[in-house]
Image: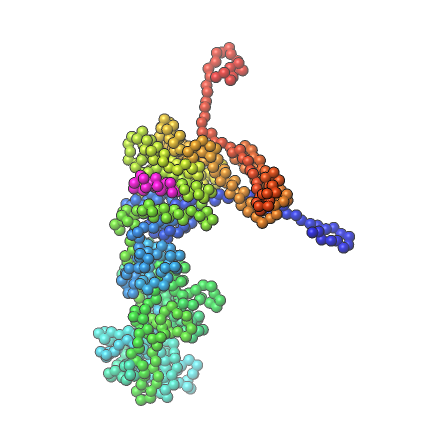
Amino acid sequence: MATPQLSPGVLVREVDLTVGRADNVLDNIGAIAGPFPIGPVNEATDIATEQDLINVFGKPKSTDNQYSYWMSASSYLSYGGVLKVVRAAGTTLSNANAAVGVSSVAMTGAGRIDNYDDYIANHSEASNFNYASKNPGTWANGLKVCVIDDFADQTLSLTEVPDTAVVGQGVSVSKTDLVVPGAGTTSLFSGYIKGIVTGINTVTNVADVKVVSRVTTAGVETKIDYEEGAGYASFSAADSVTFLNGSGAKVGASHTVSTAVDWYDQQTLGLTNATTFWKSIAPRPVTNKYALDRQGKGDGIHVVVVDDDGTITGIQGNILEKHLNLSKALDAVSAVNSPQKIWYEQFIADYSEYVYAGGNPSSAADSYWGTTPAATGFTLSNGTAASYSPISTADGLWGQDAQGITFSATGATTYILVNGTDYSGDTGSGTGMKASLADLITGYGKFANEDEIEVDYIIMGPGCDEEYDSQAKANYVISLSNARKDCMSTVGPHRSNVVGVTNSDTQTNNLISYFSPLSSSSYAVFDSGYKYTYDRFNNKFRWVPTNGDVAGLMARTSVNSYPWFSPAGQQRGILNNAIKLAYNPTKAQRDKLYPARVNSIITQPGIGTLLFGDKTGLGFASAFDRINVRRLFLTIEQALSKAAEAQLFELNDELTRANFRNIVEPYLRDVQAKRGLYGFLVVCDTTNNTPDVIDNNEFRADIFLKPSKSINYVTLTFVATRTGVSFEEVVGRA
C-alpha cells in the first residue's frame, strides 16, 4: 500500500526484484572412509592438505595394507580439493588407557572410544579408567599422563618416625614470637602450627605434611595457607614435632626435623627417559578463584601429556601438552560468566589432542582426605584442647560443585597408557590394518545424508581382499551418490584384476568381468587404473588405485576451467605422481573397455599418464553417459535449487515468477557464454503455474537445457586428388 502524501513532494519507493541469486556451488569436497592408523572413528573430518592428513590420521605405515587408503586420500588432495575422511571402525580396535595407578582395565564400550560424541555419551562418567587415548590404536601405548595437585606442602626428614605413624595423623610444632602478615612486631604469634600427615615412610624417616592452621596458646585456631619459606606457615629445620593419634594423644616422643623442604619442588613427572621437575613446568597448583569464591578449597590440578618413549614425536620425554590450573570442581569456569569450563574432564576432552579423562579418583584411590581421618582431635602439650578436624569423608571427592567443598588430593601421579590395539590382522608392527566390509560400509554411511554433510566426490579407494567384497563396496559407494544426486562416485578395479597380472588381455577381461555387474549410474565414474607411486614416508614404491586421482581431476577441472569441461585428455586429464601403470591398455583393448563403461588410464610417451575417457557408469545411451554433462547438470541443479529456496513462502504470482526468471536466465546465459550450453529455455509462467498448481501451494519452473558435448571421436579424412582437379569439385565426395 502506497504511503499517502499529505503535501507536495517526491515519494521514492524501492521494489526489490533481485531476491535470491544463483552461484556455482561445487566446493570440490571429496570423501573417503578407510582404516587409518590414528584419528577419530566413524566421524567425518575435514582435511585440506596432506599435512592435515598426517596430523589427524597419521602416516602410512611401512608394511601394512592400509597405505592404499592413505595414498588414495593423498592423491586426491594433490589436485587441490578438500577431503572429508572417516576412519572406519574395527572389531579389534581399542584405546590405550590407564586405570587407578598405572594398570589398564577393560573399558566400557568394547574398550573403544570412537570420537568426542561417543566419549560424551558413553564414557565421560566412566569409573574404570582415569585416562585413555583420544582415539584407538597402538599409537598411544607408552604415552604418559602426569597429574599433580596440592597434595602436600612440605617434606620433613626426621631423626625418627614412629612405627605407628600413618597417613591421616596430626602433626604439630611449637612456635614462639613468629611475625605474621599484618601483625608487625608488636603482636607476634606464639602457639602451634599444626598439619596432617599425607605421606609417610618409616624406613627413610620422611613424612609429607599438609599445613592446616595456627593455634594460639589460648586455643584460638586460624586456618593458614602454606607459603614456601614463610616461617609463620611452615615447619622448619630443628623444629621438634609431635605426632598425634586418632584420639589426639601424642604418638611417641617428639622428633627433630633435620630438613624441611618444599614438597612441590621435589616432585618429578615420573618419566622413564627423562627427569623433569614439576616446578619447571608451572608453579604449584592452587585453589582456583572460582572455588575460593564459593568457600571451596584444593581444587587446582595440572595435567601434562608426555611422549615418554618418543613413539609419537621421535623425541623421548617430549612434552606434548600442558593443561594448567584446571579444577576438580564440576561447575568450575575460568572466570565469572565465562563459558570456558575448567572442570578438568571437560577441558581435556575439548582441548587435548591426545587423551580423554575418565572417572574421578575414588576415595579408595585417594592418598588422603577422602579416607577416614586417623586424627579426630588435637591436644596441645600444655593440656589445652584445640579442635583438630581433618577433612570429613563427606567432603573431598572430585566432580562436585565447588560450593563448600575441600577436595581430596592424589599428589604427583603418572599414568601409563597401555593395551591399545589396531585393526584385525595387525601384529603391532603395522601389518594388516584391515577393516571389514561391514565396517567400511558403516564408515561410508556417514556421507549418506546430503542435508548434514556436503560432498562432491565419493572416492572408493582400494577394494577388499575378495573380489566380490570389492564389488559390494563399489556398489554401496555408487548407491550413495545415486541417493544423494548431488555428487559423483569414483570407482576403481579390484587390485588383483590388474596388479601382478602379466597378460594385458587377461587384465582387460578381468576388468570387464568386474565392472559389468556394477550398478548403472550417471553419478559414478569407473576407471581401469592402478598407478605405481613413491611413498616418501617409507622410502618405497606402492601400487595405488587411481580413483582418488579421477576425483582429483574433476576437482582440478572445476578450479582451472569449469565443471562442464571434461576432466579427461591431454588438456585436463594428466595424473599426478604416476611412475607407471599396472595396466596400460592398447587401442583395441580400450575399444572393449569403453562400451563396458570403463574409462582407461593410459600412459602416452612425451605426455604422461592420463585419463582417456569421460564416460559415466550409466548402462545405456544418454546425454548423461558423459562426465561433463552429468557435472553440468549437477552444477546448475545445485545453483538453481539454492536460488529457488529464496522463493519459498512467497506469493505465486507474476512478480515472483518474473523475479525467479530474472535470477535463472542471466545465470544460464553466463554458463552458455562459458561453453557449458548450446542453448536453454526457462518457462515459469501461467502455462506451468496453473490455478491447480497454485492452489496446491506449488511453484513450477521448467528449465530446458542443450548441454555442450565433449569430443570423444575424431575422424581425419585425407583425400588424394589428381593435379588438374579443383578442390571444389571433390569436396563432399570422400
Q: Residue at x 47, y 37 (%)?
A: 630
x and y, in percent, of residue 225 in the image:
38, 76
Along the viewing direction, whichever of 522 and 420 lies nearer the viewer: 522
Q: Residue at x 32, y 86 (%)?
A: 380
Is 472 one of the magenta-colored residues?
yes
x and y, in percent, of residue 702 in the image:
56, 38
x and y, in percent, of residue 98 in the image:
30, 61
Q: Residue at x 39, y 42 (%)?
A: 477
Along the viewing direction, whichever of 695 and 176 lies nearer the viewer: 695
- State how many labels appear: 0
In the image, is residue 72 above or below residue 508? Answer: below
x and y, in percent, of residue 577 in the image:
37, 39
Among all residues in the image, which is located at the extreme right?
Answer: 8
Among all residues in the image, which is located at the extreme top?
Answer: 724
In the picture, measured across the screen, residue 64 lies left or right of residue 78, that is left
In the image, is residue 26 above or below residue 729? Answer: below
In the image, is residue 566 above or below residue 433? Answer: above
State the image quarter where residue 460 is shown. Answer: top left
Magenta stretch, residue numbers = 457-477
- Is residue 191 something one can see in this rendering? no
Q: Residue at x 59, y 39 (%)?
A: 688
Is 535 one of the magenta-colored residues?
no
Along the viewing direction, whichever of 528 and 436 lies nearer the viewer: 436
In the picture, measured across the screen, residue 210 lies left or right of residue 81, that is left
State the image quarter where residue 527 is shown. Answer: top left
Along the viewing direction, whichever of 614 and 222 lies nearer the viewer: 614
- Is residue 642 something one can see in this rendering? yes
